Image (tube, grey):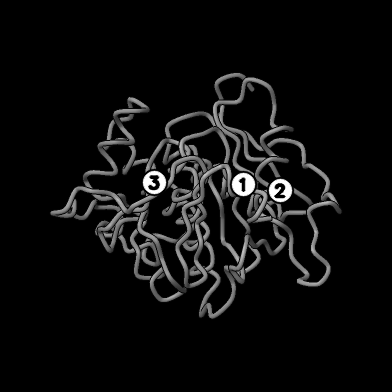
Amino acid sequence: MVGKICVVPVGEVAESDLAFARDVVEASFGRETLVCEPLPLQDEYYYPARGQYGANGFLRYVEVNAPRGAYRAVGITARDIFAGDLNFLFGIGRCPGKCAVVSTYRFGFYCPTPERRMVRFAKLLVHETGHTFGLLHCRQPPCVMRFADGYETLDDTRLAMCARCERSLCAVTALDAGERRKNLDGVFTKYGLWEEAGGAEGLEPPPAPADLTPAKSLPRTLLGAYAGLITHVDADYEEFLE
């Protein structure tokens, strides 16, 4: 596992979702990506009154139990997660860091087709893993690193990063931007998602925003809070968020 990205199931996750996650992450971040053995769900992270799991607990759980030497660990769970006063989260990522977690629980909500669900999943995989490379929430509306305040905004977001975010990612990873887009195009063609993903335009980076200042944040933990509220959280606040 040394130098590879590990997709880590937490609890029972559909094999088809894990295979898709592996392909999307590998194409987007240019590292061999493997699906690891699943981690069992832990009762200590479960909140019976809410029927949900604490996102920060899941994040630490994956970090601690990821294979030694992994380049990145991307936890995937089919369970509903939340943090703080937020009703739910689609995902959470350490920024910068080595770990992200994505929940598939809500991707099928308000969803007209199975293809739309998978494209939403792909956007969150790229978004949350992007945080681990130091990418903050972006101000450019179509950029996949943009904060989405609901399903409509999420669906309007492209799978592409804006020119600034893509340059930042390529600088950190030594990726070639054109090759990255070609690889993603291949993944969505393979899964029959090319049209739902927006075709060539969906993978073409929108221009960087005129204001190059990223959204104000406290580095360490970034919540992909697709629940109507953006939250950037410093490590000191993690106990509160659980």
Q: Earlier in the sequence, mark 2 or mark 3?
A: 2
What's the residue type where badge 3 is placed? Leu
Residue 59 in the image: state x and y as whole percent.
65, 44
What's the residue type where badge 1 is placed? Ala
Q: Nearer the viewer, residue 216 or 206?
A: 216
Mark 1 — residue?
Answer: 19
At x 72% / y 61%, what residue is drawn?
A: 79
Check whether the beta carbons of the residues at disc 3 and disc 1 lie within 8 A of each other: no
Quadrant containing the N terminus is: top right
Task: Tell whether 170 sits left or right of 71.
Answer: left
Crowd rating for badge 3 (residues with CA inside 10 Å; few <14, some 14–19, many 20+) = many
Q: Quick one: SS at disc 2?
A: helix
Q: Quick one: SS at disc 3?
A: helix
Q: Nearer the viewer, residue 6 or 18?
A: 6
Task: Tell whether 182 sits left or right of 52.
Answer: left
Marking on residue 57: 2
Residue 20 in the image: state x and y as whole percent.
57, 50
Q: Quick one: SS at disc 1?
A: helix
Mark 3 — residue?
Answer: 184
